[in-house]
Amino acid sequence: MRLINRHPDGPGRLLLVVLPFALLLCAYLYGSAARLADNPNDKLLPSTAQMAEAVKRMAFEQDLRTGERPLWQDTAASLRRLGMGLAIAAVAGLSLGLLAGTVPLLGAPLSPLLTVLSMVPPLAMLPVLFIVFGLGELSKVMLIVIGITPILARDLEQQARDIPRELLVKAQTLGASTWTLILRVVLPQLLPRLLVDLRLVLGSAWLFLIAAEAIASTDGLGYRIFLVRRYLAMDVILPYVGWITALAWAMDWALRQVGRRAFPWYHGGNR
């Protein structure tokens, strides 16, 4: 049997999923043990015990200055900003992509504009956002919105253009107006793709959030990472990075489940 036609079974698939993570963990543990054996005060690769102690301190002990538990306070602040940014970007991207891909008179000016905006490096706009919106919450949210909205809009525009022309002609033959076509024919086709696109831009959204929090913030996961880096506190930084990764994975999983349950036809009928 050709390799391209071979598929892993249940236990084999689980093994293949776990294997790369296990190899990375083993490599880290070996490197950490080797460095700590040479220098017990080494901070670059902390032991699991050191990281567990740091997690205990950050997650379960109150900060003497704020009275809060830093990990949960930072998580709540970051998720609030990220949620607002993704929600605004989703609405804006869907609206722009829907109109640009469906209405030719709007697509003519919007399509090249979205293309140009998608080429602007969002992080280069961060100083401008701080000047325009200040150092508060709005500038951090707007960085996420500016960073991912053009990407969402361009993909959804293309999805709208790829809808079979025959489907639109049939709807018009049955008396559908422009808004009926948009709301009853095109929009249902784009909603499941929007969830897929949000999954694809999650990594970028986290990147923009961490960058904004690192530069101008008093809380948040990005703020904490860049705050403790001056002390080379890798026992805090690595768990925070792992926690961000876990949150991103959970959000990706949640969006995937919503898509499968709300639009089973888009995923081949599999719930």
Image (spheres, helix red, strand yellow):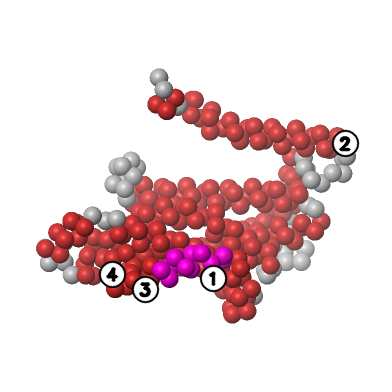
The quadrant in which residue 45 appears is: top right
Q: CA distance from mark 2 to mark 1?
A: 47 Å
- Of the two numbered discs 2 and 4 on the same chain, state the one appearing first in sequence: 2
Q: Within 10 Å of the Cα at label 1, are there few (<14), some (14-19), or many (20+) other Cα atoms?
A: many
Where does the image place residue 88, in percent across and percent down from the top left?
A: 46, 68
Instruction: Identify the amino acid type marked 4.
Output: Pro
- Of the two numbered discs 2 and 3 on the same chain, state the one appearing first in sequence: 2
Where does the image place residue 55, in percent across and percent down from the top left?
A: 71, 49
**Mark 2: secondary structure:** helix
Q: Residue 73: which numbered mark, if any?
A: none
The residue tagged 2 is: 38
Q: Within 10 Å of the Cα at label 4, are there few (<14), some (14-19), or many (20+) other Cα atoms?
A: few
Q: Residue at x 41, y 47 (%)?
A: 257
Which callout, 2 or 3, points to the residue nearer the camera?
3
Q: Residue at x 72, y 37 (%)?
A: 28
State which region is magenta.
112-122
Where does the image place residue 183, in percent across and percent down from the top left?
A: 26, 65
- Of the two numbered discs 4 and 1 on the same chain, state the one appearing first in sequence: 4
Q: Is residue 235 left or right of residue 261?
A: right
Which quadrant holds the N terminus? top left
Foreground: 76 or 235? Answer: 235
- Of the two numbered discs 3 and 4 on the same chain, state the one appearing first in sequence: 4
- Residue placed furthest toward the left: 174
Instruction: Identify the amino acid type marked 2.
Output: Asp
The residue tagged 4 is: 104
**Mark 4: secondary structure:** helix
Q: Is residue 1 visible?
A: yes
Which quadrant holds the C terminus? top left
Give yes or no for contact between labels 2 and 3 (Cβ–Cβ under 8 Å): no
The residue tagged 3 is: 109
Which callout, 4 or 1, points to the residue nearer the camera?
4
Magenta span has 136?
Answer: no
